């Protein structure tokens, strides 16, 4: 069969299929684009309606409030009942009489002081719960000072909008708290009005508590104190969209059905017969390749030729006839090629088998190295060194088909089983004398030791009787023994040189990891020791007690953990928080010990302890966090701190943590110039401010953690008192 004839057949089906798919895509795209454009137009119309209605409603409410305010003098002569009653609820109404106030209507809420009410209508909170709000003001009319407050549930104007069928109305404060909705409960929980916050959406799409979708827009209202929304349910928009596009949708769906019907008809009448020809050609090719003798070839050619003639006689398609004739002439060429292929097939099969075996060995070695290197790249002091070695042990066990894998760490005269994978019993943590058994032999020889019968002298056999064979490979780093890699099998395994060649560099790699980990741990212990000695200087020089520094460490550890820091970063912040005031070593002792407040010059000197602390610590990379804490822990989130007036995220996060912890502990502690604050007083100062300390001084995320877990801060402080 000539290749160009097959391409003719493939081109017919492919071109036709592409054409049909293209037409369907065009119609579908047009339908989608039409729907999207119509939806946008519809939303634009609804938005125009909303922005026309909301200002009118706001004006009506403001007019009613103004009328109520203008009628206030009538109360003095005719009483409240003589006034034209507004359509909203008057929560309280009173008049000032000298130093006292007379309540005419309702009752003044406990959180509202009439004399302090603003001169303009304002939204005020009246109680501890989230839903207790009023619109209130204090006004002077006709020589009398009135104060009044009304409920923000202004339902009156919306009752006149019954023509806007299916539309929902919502009113919130400027923070998004839902104050009123119509119908009740369509967006928030009706038992918890004010508890649901409406998050402003630029797209206009909202989802209520039950998962229903709405589209709407809002605008400021009532002297800018409230925000009103008009919302349409999604089903309302979809019904409106469907009513406008129903004819277009039906027509284009009909076109799609017609196109698919045409495709099915052409496929059955024209393309399917051509597929039969192609399948016969493939069948003939298979038979020719399976023939191994001249007789088989003759029989196959005769049968195939008959099939071709039958197709040719039945076909009414020109392409099929041309294809059949071309295929017949090609049969003889296939016969000749088949004889040549048979003669060389055995040699190719033998060569292929050898290549497969070699490839399997290389693939296995590549797979295990890839897994081990991938694990090694992810092993850090934070992610868990032991877990990384466990993953390497699991990879070795999987690739070698072993019963178990041990990685032992040399500690003095013993091998400590650091990690293990497999085995019926957990043996991690077991210590074995380094000079005994297989491990001792391997260490003395400096090379792997393989025991086909591990029951004789094997390490594994003493730990698990299931082990029948094992290998132990000593691990060295720069000529120094650091541990041992041992692998055991449940069945007898003769010595495998290829496996040993694979495991030796892996053992060396693991040995390097063990040595590096040990060096890093020793270095970190040195850092901790040096830091502890430095903080002792601070405690000796001024009144920063050891208990204060201990609490600082615990506060910072708690806050860092709550922020989601890694274990190592949490410990660094906690440790270096002890050095936050080390710069006070350079502050004159008479200033630090002065009774009473400092003058301006003295306070400026004390403020330099931040810079001096950074100078004392120097530029060592491992003290970077400590230096940042010293230098910036008196900076404030709003930029009012010192020494540089940095603000926001310009301040390192570690210094922001120490800033809150130090402020809390300083307020709780008794100093020479102040009394100690209780936990409740401290919370009030940090969260509410007292002039010197304000909530805006602290990172909002950190102060949120403090507000949610202030009891934990108190536990830390109180527990330190119990231990002293």
Image (cartoon, grey):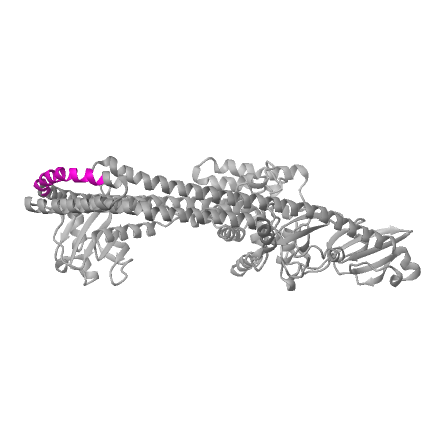
- Viewer-proximal residue among 322 and 216: 322
- State the image coordinates of residue 94 (x, y, percent, origin top left): 84, 59
Q: Quadrant of the N terminus?
A: top left
Q: Can residue 693 be seen in this view?
A: no
- Viewer-proximal residue among 327 and 505: 327
- State the image coordinates of residue 319 (x, y, percent, origin top left): 27, 39
- Name the residue located 87 percent from the left edge and 52 percent from the top edge: 70
Q: Is residue 269 visible?
A: yes
Q: Is 558 displayed left or right of 159 in the figure?
A: left
- Viewer-proximal residue among 423 and 272: 272
- Name the residue located 66 percent from the left edge and 36 percent from the top edge: 601
Magenta residues, start to end = 323-345
Relative to residue 472, is residue 622 depicted above or below? above
- State the image coordinates of residue 81 (x, y, percent, origin top left): 87, 63
Q: Residue 338 magenta-drawn?
A: yes
Q: Is 236 displayed left or right of 654 in the figure?
A: right
Relative to residue 372, is residue 165 depicted above or below? below
- Name the residue located 24 percent from the left edge and 45 percent from the top edge: 277
Q: Residue 643 magenta-drawn?
A: no
As drawn, the residue found furthest toward the bottom would be: 191
- Give the overall secondary structure of the magenta segment: helix
Relative to residue 254, is residue 126 depicted above or below? below
- State the image coordinates of residue 667 (x, y, percent, origin top left): 62, 52
Tally of marks: 0
- Viewer-proximal residue among 722 and 689: 689
């Amino acid at each position: 069969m000539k290749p160009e004839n097959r391409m003719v057949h493939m081109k017919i089906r492919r071109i036709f299929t592409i054409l049909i798919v293209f037409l369907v895509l065009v119609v579908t795209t047009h339908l989608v684009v039409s729907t999207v454009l119509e939806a946008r137009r519809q939303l634009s119309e609804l938005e125009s309606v909303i922005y026309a209605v909301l200002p009118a409603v706001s004006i009506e409410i403001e007019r009613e409030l103004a009328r109520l305010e203008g009628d206030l003098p009538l109360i003095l002569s005719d009483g409240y009942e003589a006034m034209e009653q507004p359509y909203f609820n008057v929560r309280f109404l009173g008049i000032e009489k000298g130093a006292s106030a007379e309540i005419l209507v309702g009752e003044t809420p406990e959180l509202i002081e009439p004399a302090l009410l603003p001169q303009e209508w304002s939204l005020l909170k009246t109680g501890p719960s989230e839903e207790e709000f009023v619109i209130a003001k204090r006004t002077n009319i006709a020589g009398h000072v009135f104060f009044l407050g009304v409920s923000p549930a202004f339902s009156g104007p919306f009752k006149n909008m019954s023509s806007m069928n299916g539309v929902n109305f919502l009113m919130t404060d400027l923070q998004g708290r839902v104050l009123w909705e119509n119908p009740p409960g369509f967006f928030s929980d009706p038992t918890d009005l004010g508890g649901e916050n409406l998050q402003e959406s630029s797209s206009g799409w909202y989802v209520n508590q039950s998962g229903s979708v709405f589209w709407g827009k809002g605008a400021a209202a009532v002297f800018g104190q409230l925000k009103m929304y008009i919302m349409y349910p999604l089903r309302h928009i979809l019904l409106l969209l469907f009513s406008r596009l129903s004819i277009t949708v039906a027509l284009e769906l009909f076109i799609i059905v017609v196109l698919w019907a045409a495709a099915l008809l052409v496929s059955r009448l024209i393309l399917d017969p051509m597929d039969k020809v192609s399948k016969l050609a493939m069948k003939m090719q298979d038979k020719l390749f399976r023939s191994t003798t001249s007789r088989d070839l003759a029989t196959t050619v005769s049968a195939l030729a008959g099939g071709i003639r039958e197709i040719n006689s039945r076909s009414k398609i020109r392409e099929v006839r041309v294809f059949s004739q071309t295929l017949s002439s090609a049969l003889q060429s296939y016969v000749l090629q088949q004889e040549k292929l048979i003669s060389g097939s055995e040699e190719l099969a033998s060569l292929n088998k050898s290549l497969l075996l070699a490839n399997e060995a290389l693939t296995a070695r590549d797979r295990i190295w890839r897994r081990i290197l991938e694990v090694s790249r992810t092993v850090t002091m934070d992610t868990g060194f032991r877990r990384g070695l466990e993953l390497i042990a699991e990879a070795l066990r999987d690739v070698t088909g072993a019963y178990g894998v041990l990685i032992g760490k040399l500690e003095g005269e013993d091998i400590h089983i650091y990690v293990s994978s497999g085995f019926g019993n957990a043996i991690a943590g077991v210590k074995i004398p380094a000079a005994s058994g297989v491990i001792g032999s391997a260490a003395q020889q400096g090379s792997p030791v393989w025991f086909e019968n591990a029951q004789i002298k094997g390490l594994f056999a003493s730990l698990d009787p299931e082990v029948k064979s094992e290998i132990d490979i000593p691990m060295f780093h720069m000529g120094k023994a650091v541990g041992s890699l041992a692998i055991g099998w449940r069945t007898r395994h003769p010595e495998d040189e290829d496996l040993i060649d694979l495991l030796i560099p892996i053992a060396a790699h693991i040995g390097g990891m063990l040595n590096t980990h040990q060096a890093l741990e020793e270095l970190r212990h040195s850092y901790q020791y040096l830091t502890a000695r430095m903080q002792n200087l601070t405690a000796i020089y001024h009144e920063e007690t050891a208990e204060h520094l201990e609490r600082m460490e615990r506060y910072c550890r708690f806050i860092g953990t709550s922020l989601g820091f890694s274990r190592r970063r949490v410990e660094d912040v906690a440790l270096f928080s002890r050095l936050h005031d080390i710069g006070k070593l350079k502050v004159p002792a008479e200033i630090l010990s002065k009774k009473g407040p400092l003058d301006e010059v003295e306070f400026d000197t004390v403020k330099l302890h931040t810079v001096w602390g950074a100078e004392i610590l120097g530029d060592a990379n491992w003290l970077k966090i400590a230096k940042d804490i010293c230098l910036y822990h008196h900076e404030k989130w709003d930029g009012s701190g010192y020494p540089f007036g940095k603000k926001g995220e310009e301040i390192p996060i570690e210094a922001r943590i120490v800033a809150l912890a130090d402020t809390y502990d300083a307020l709780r502690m008794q100093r020479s110039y102040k009394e100690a604050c209780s936990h409740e007083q401290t919370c009030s100062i940090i969260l509410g401010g007292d002039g010197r300390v304000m909530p805006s001084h602290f990172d909002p995320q950190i102060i949120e953690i403090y507000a949610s877990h202030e009891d934990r801060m108190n536990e830390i402080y109180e527990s330190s008192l119990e231990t002293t």
